[in-house]
Image: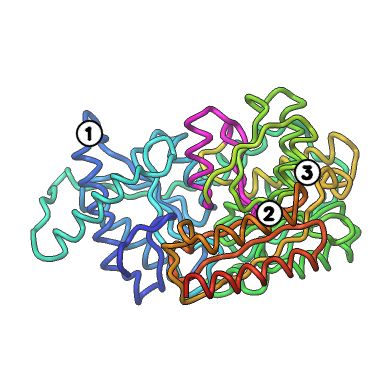
Amino acid sequence: MGRLFGTDGVRGVANADLTAELALGLSVAAAHVLAEAGTFEGHRPTAVVGRDPRASGEFLEAAVVAGLASAGVDVLRVGVLPTPAVAYLTGALGADLGVMLSASHNAMPDNGIKFFARGGHKLADELEDRIESVYEEHRTGNPWQRPTGGGVGRVKSYDEGFDQYVAHLIGVLPNRLDGLKIVLDEAHGAASRVSPEAFARAGAEVITIGADPDGLNINDGCGSTHLDLLKAAVVEHGADLGIAHDGDADRCLAVDHTGDEVDGDQILAVLALAMRERGALRKDTVVATVMSNLGFKLAMEGEGVALVQTGVGDRYVLESMKEHGYALGGEQSGHVIILDHATTGDGTLTGLMLAARVAQTGRGLKELAGVMERLPQVLINVPDVDKSRVSTSPELTAAVTDAERELGATGRVLLRSSGTEPLVRVMVEAADIDQARSVAERLADVVKSALG
């Protein structure tokens, strides 16, 4: 698998890349590294462990629990819950460590392990590096120091986590959802019970699809990566809106009453104005990545909301929010972070807040999302080029300058090296789709000739 930890934990094909042995070893290593860092000092350590419904999560959970308990960590098994629920419970229960088993929006054969530090925050990069190093050291033969007798960890189920998390979601809503009819697509994933319960308790009439996980059907033609079923269901039932989650429910996309998609940029725009209205948008600023649609930036400028842009990835959004004290940030893909109430993207919370704005204003989601106009966006991947020279090629720099001059204030060019593949991504936005496509194709040709 190369380096084990990526931008979102350890991920791979379950039982091929991500084996029970690896899960157990990483868990033991995590316990030892956190002990060395002083996290467990002066008390008996506790970890919260949750998973999504993938079949492989059953044996991987057993391996993680065994590893932690063998290292002297008491374990609270919360069962199938969303990633943000595990993060929340890690903080709410005062646990020293949280572990989530999920591959998010990936296909069912994949799985992943994500560790949370005390408070429910993502582990620092240096701790992840240290865990990987310690794991490798002991995998090759150096024996672990293991507790015996009463020093081993104890394991118990913590079924209260479900109600505790739902109560948290309801408790932070600014208003109820009475009178709204909402379709929820749960992607046969981790929020299949939590999300319908939360929306119903908040007062909405709830219709669910994709809420029958069997361990094999997660993300299969449904959820935030496949919106067609949700669009059809919203129109069929005459619903006010629809909400779609991914497999671990850390993201949310929406559909208005006509069946049109409302993406992460539009959701951010609606929530930014709602939070500013009630004084919750600190510094009147929202954080998004450089991949956000130019229409979002123009809309925020028009509304007097400042926009801070980061590199691609919700981890960079979160870093900027924490460093500067911002309250709202997210990505076009639907990862939305409301930092006053969550330490990570929370799809159920985002959906609830979006619905609360519809209920509070009495305006439809289509009208609310109309605060921004999505400019046509064309993305072309150019493979087999020297991506390291993307910022230093004079030919490419000149071509980008010409393109930006042609597009003017209502267009944008972004060239980005892939972090995982030998390719360069060419993204062009313009007021007209034909112009966007023409400029993108021209730039792609220059990338091939200049970097090929």
Residue type, numbered disc 1: Gly
**SS class of the residue under badge 3?**
helix
State the image coordinates of residue 8 (x, y, percent, origin top left).
44, 55
Q: Are marks 3 and 2 in contact (CB under 8 Å)?
A: no
**SS class of the residue under badge 1?**
loop
Q: For residue 38, which numbered disc appears in the image?
A: 1
Q: Residue at x 77, y 32 (%)?
A: 175
> Which marked residue is nearer to the observer: mark 3 or mark 2?
2
For label 2, the crowd category at 10 Å Cα-Cα, with few meaning under 14, some 14 to 19 and many 20 or more, is some
Q: Nearer the viewer, residue 427 or 324?
A: 427
- Residue that extends furthest to the left in the rendered view of this protein: 142
Q: Which residue is mark 3?
A: 355
**SS class of the residue under badge 2?**
helix
Q: Is residue 220 above or below residue 356?
A: below
Residue type, numbered disc 2: Glu
State the image coordinates of residue 89 (x, y, percent, origin top left).
47, 40
State the image coordinates of residue 143 (x, y, percent, origin top left).
9, 58
Q: Residue at x 37, y 44 (%)?
A: 123
Q: Are marks 1 and 3 in contact (CB under 8 Å)?
A: no
The magenta-colored residue range is 312-341
Q: Is residue 277 above or below residue 308?
A: above
Residue type, numbered disc 3: Ala
Q: CA distance from mark 1 to mark 2?
A: 52 Å
Q: CA distance from mark 3 to mark 2?
A: 38 Å
Earlier-in-chain disc, 3 versus 2 = 3
> Which marked residue is nearer to the observer: mark 1 or mark 2?
2
Q: For residue 213, which numbered disc appears in the image?
A: none
State the image coordinates of residue 353 (x, y, percent, origin top left).
72, 40
